[in-house]
Image (tube, rainbow, N blue to C red):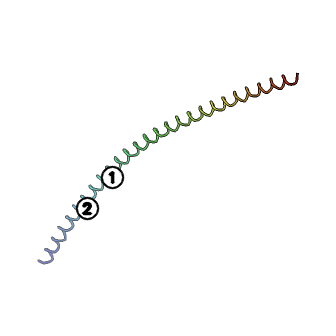
Amino acid sequence: MPLADEMMNLRREIDSLHAARKAMVNRLNRFRVDLRKNMTRRMTDLRSAFKKECARARAARHAFSAHNQDMVSQMLGAFSAERATAHRNFRGKRA
């Protein structure tokens, strides 16, 4: 009955390989679920950090723009005052 023993051994090997395959598929499924959960959490954190950085950059850009507008306004005011003074002086010397 060596053939029957070999067939039984082969059947046991097939059963053990089937169980090992089933365990591997279960581990892969758990890994997939964990990976998806971790990636979702990381993407959420990344989006949050990106939104915070955008808000900070927007505030800095608005502050920079407001400062530049103030500087230009002051320069135009000073230029206008110097021009008015030069005009008065020119008229005074001419008359």
- Name above or below for residue 23 compared with residue 36: below
Residue 84 in the image: state x and y as whole percent. Answer: 77, 25
- Residue ID at (79%, 27%): 86
Location of the N terminus (image quadrant): bottom left
Residue 65 pos. (x, y %):
60, 34
Counting from the top left corner in percent of width and height, residue 33 is at 32, 49
| Residue located at (73% from left, 26% from top) | 81
Q: Residue at x 62, y 34 (%)?
A: 68
Question: Extreme left residue here?
Answer: 1
Label 1 Cα crowd, 10 Å radius (few <14 / some 14-19 / many 20+):
few
The residue under label 1 is 32
Q: Residue lying farthest bottom?
A: 2
In this rendering, position of residue 44 left or right of residue 72: left
Q: For the point 38% across and 46% down, which residue is it?
A: 42
Tell me: residue 48, above or below residue 87.
below
User: In this image, 77 relative to 55: left or right?
Assistant: right
Proximity of marks 1 and 2: CB atoms separated by less than 8 Å = no
Which residue is labeled 2 in the image? 21
As displayed, is residue 51 above or below residue 21?
Answer: above
Q: Quadrant of residue 12?
A: bottom left
Which badge, 1 or 2, comes first in the chain's sequence? 2
In this rendering, which labeled residue sits more in front, label 1 or label 2? 1
Q: Nearer the viewer, residue 56 or 13?
A: 56
Q: Nearer the viewer, residue 77 or 44?
A: 77
Give residue 14's position: percent from left, percent from top: 21, 67
Helix, strand or loop at label 1? It is helix
Relative side of 6 to 46, left or right: left
